[in-house]
Image (cartoon, grey):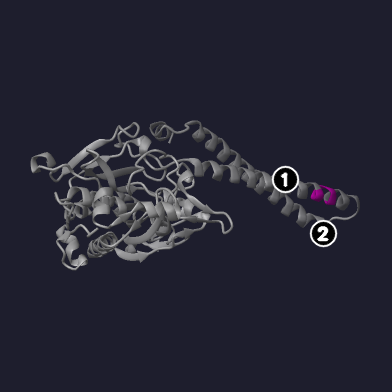
Amino acid sequence: MRASQRARGEDVALVDALLSADERRRSSGVRFDELRAEQKALGKLIPKATGDEKAELLRKAEQLKADVKAADADRDAAAAETQELLLKLSNIVHPDVPVGGEDDFVTLETHGTIRDFAAEGFEPKDHLELGQILGAIDVERGAKVSGSRFYFLTGVGALLELALVNAAIAQATAAGFTPMLTPALVRPQSMAGTGFLGQAAQDVYHLDKDDLYLVGTSEVPLAAYHMDEIIDADRLPLRYAGFSPCFRREAGSHGKDTRGIFRVHQFDKVEMFSFVAPEDSQEEHRRLLEWEKQWLTSLELPFRVIDVASGDLGSSAARKYDCEAWIPTQGKYRELTSTSDCTEFQSRRLQIRVRDGKTVRPLATLNGTLCAVPRTIVAILENHQQPDGSVRVPEVLRPYLGGRELLEPVAK
């Protein structure tokens, strides 16, 4: 755990503080049990005693009562401190994860061909210009209505979102996932249990009056779906594909991606989520990555797969792979999907266990974005644009867009 904290660039001393608190929890628990046993034994003697002996026993009983109460308070305080410190610790990093910060990832593979727009004889337009030409994106009125980093999808933009969501759900369903429409508001226990009230807390919207949180991903309600349950081993793996609106403050991204809809406060997403036996989590992680690669390939997008470095992992992830699509006007790859192996981290916090014969133990949880809609629209518009501002529709989406092969500019 110390090595993991160090690799993440997080507080190593937290591990020792937790061990110390846990020792106090254990010792205070033993002390409480000893005093309670003594109290019970004394309680059996008092009815049989008389005179001065009984008076002395009653005096001892009063003292024991106070000692038991104090020991109980010490035990509860130590347990609360232990739990508080435990919730501050991130998951243990997988030993094969590259160590370092955001730029220390390892590229595992690349797919597709990056278009040479110069050879085609035109300068590519960015997604916002294309969105305006197509009558698909309106950020000005989004800002007027809701503020910066909000937007309207209009006309073919709205239809493109619905096509993406339907195609993504169709792929997930064909792969054996159960489609889910999930709540966008969750209780604190659900948010904390999935690890989003630690380092990611600054990006979470909280409704103080109701003490509810707006989810930044349907991973949260999907993880909490089986909270406080014991699942029979023969039901695993359990796979869900959740569709939900997602809300993020983007508190640490001031000045980044301010143009267009790449980084916004509200968006829709299709998320894959798996519950598996712990020994199967790495294999499931590879499966989720393959499904993401299948999806991006079907959209005919050039992309690469990276092994995310330890300092850039979310607190719940032991390992994470990102699929980054090429964005022509930015001249670089940008994250479109990601998949994380959270091992037993979330299930322990949410009390989700698997029963295998007489053994009951925590299971493993994994998540994988299949389609974060706005970023996917950005990639499609820019990579499939034509010189006149029209955009070629990938074949996989055509059945969900009435068979149209092109998104065409609207008349002014």
Which of these two is toward me, 271 or 49?
Answer: 271
* Residue 322 is at least partly visible in this image: no
Q: From the image, tell me which residue sits under label 2.
A: 47
Rendered position, 359 above or below 286: below
The x, y position of residue 405, in whole percent, is 14, 61
Q: Looking at this view, name the residue that lies furthest to the bottom.
A: 402
Q: From the image, tell me which residue sits under label 1.
A: 70
Q: Which mark is residue 252?
A: none
The x, y position of residue 65, in whole percent, is 77, 50
* Quadrant position of residue 273: bottom left
The x, y position of residue 207, in whole percent, is 54, 55
Q: Is residue 212 left or right of residue 148?
A: right
Which of these two is toward me, 319 or 374?
Answer: 374
Quadrant into which the N terminus falls: top left
* Quadrant position of residue 311: top left
* Quadrant position of residue 370: bottom left
Secondary structure mostly taken by the magenta-highlighted segment of the chain: helix
Q: Residue at x 24, y 56 (%)?
A: 134
Task: Please report whichever mark, 1 or 2, sits nearer to the chain's N-terminal start.
Answer: 2
Quadrant into which the C terminus falls: bottom left
User: Residue 61 lies in magenta, yes or no?
Assistant: yes
Which of these two is toward me, 250 or 200?
Answer: 250
The x, y position of residue 281, in whole percent, is 31, 50
Which segment is the magenta one? 58-62
* Residue 337 is at least partly visible in this image: yes
